[in-house]
Amino acid sequence: MWGLIGGVAIALIATSVGRAEVHFKTVSFDDAKKLAAKEHKLIMVDFYTSWCGWCKVLDRKTYTDENVGKIADAKFISIKLDAEHGEGVGLAHTYGITGYPTIIFFSADGKEVDRVVGYEDADRFARSLETAAAGGAKAAVDATQGANPTKDPEKWLIAGNYLAEHGDNAGALSAFKQVLELDPSNKHGQKEEAIYDVGFLTSDGSQWKTLETALQEFPKRAEAQQATMILVRHDFEQKQPESAARRMDRWAMAHPDDGQMFNFFAWTAAENSAVLDKAAEYAKRALAIAPTPQEKASVMDTQAEVLFKSGKTAEASKTESDALAMLDPGRDKKLYNELAGQKAKFDKAAGETANSASNPK
């Protein structure tokens, strides 16, 4: 238990997470508030889980960025809390966290200033840090309203993100479209994010064209992966699996180590019982680069589904058994139970196949 002893200042241990430039403190939330008050800073709390893939990407790609580290260390007391262990459980419930990663920024007295839900690349997260330090996104929303709304595309972008995170998708879409009007040539660097957001929030037929345009103009944005996933799924829904496969091949050429995308494509193909040979190929590639037993087991589950949809029920059951063997039933309870359910499905199908073979009509 960390705290004040006899008026002596809080003893703190600052540790880096991996190679992170952001220096997270190994202290409780209460002690972070005390330190923030002492140093006149805000608090950044990263709520994560052990199974969250995007949390790991955030650690590896965003927190290691030099600029992000400088801003975070200068303006925030940063801590990490596992939302499924210790005090993280109660705080995650208190603040209504349902997705990971979720990063919440607090004032020194514990009032929420702003939050980021989901992964952000280094450039966007640096802006999120600056926004929180300046009072939060609500201030930007206020600037876009009233008789004389701001002409600053960055404030409209911040407002759009805030409205989207608070469930006002119509308001968010309007704000992002305003960014495109104010920054049509990306002079201020706001269009490249806003055009993806417009695509994500659009519900009519123009969504696909918008996302295609975003990918053509700004293919290196972090949002490009999500856009490609949406378009791949759309290809399958339109009964155009070969188009989905070609799209996947193009993505793989530019991102040869994107195991998450490979696994997504393989699973989606299996769901649609289409291009199963291509699905098997990408599942194999995903497995080869999966870094943890949990991620390997998840990919093997995809492999088993591909085998199942290919009519190879016995092989599917065997592959699922191998995946389960990689997991700890206690530590990996949620994933273990999901895969066990899959194995039961495969076992049943394998048994029915065997019975049919031994009792032909």
Image: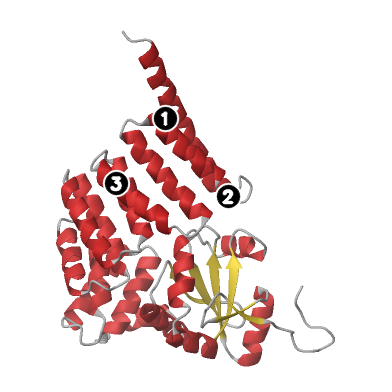
Depth check, front residue: 222 or 290? 290
Crowd tier of the residue under label 1, counting other residues whose Cα lies within 10 Å: few below 14, some 14–19, many 20 or above: many
Residue 195: mark in rendering: none
Looking at the rendered image, the quarter that the N terminus falls into is bottom right
Depth check, mark 2 against mark 1: the one in front is 1
Give the vertical position of 148 relative to 319 (above or below). below
Q: Residue furthest right?
A: 6
Residue in front for this viewpoint, 147 or 240: 240
Q: Is residue 54 shown to the viewer in this render?
A: yes
Kindly identify which numbered label has been placed on residue 314. Answer: 1
Q: Which residue is drawn at 19% across and 46% down?
A: 241
Q: Which amino acid does label 1 sit on?
A: Ala
Which circle's residue, 3 or 2, is located before the other in the chain? 3
Disc 2 to disc 1, how far (Cα)? 25 Å
The residue lying at 48 percent from left, 62 percent from top is 100
Sort mark 3 into few (<14), some (14-19) or many (20+) by Cα contacts within 10 Å: many
- Which label was assigned to residue 279? 3
> At which x and y percent is residue 29?
65, 74
Q: According to the image, label 2 marks what residue?
A: 332
Q: In which quarter of the image is residue 176?
A: bottom left
Classify mark 3: helix, strand or loop. Answer: helix
Work out whether mark 2 precedes mark 1 in sequence or the reverse, and give the earlier one: 1
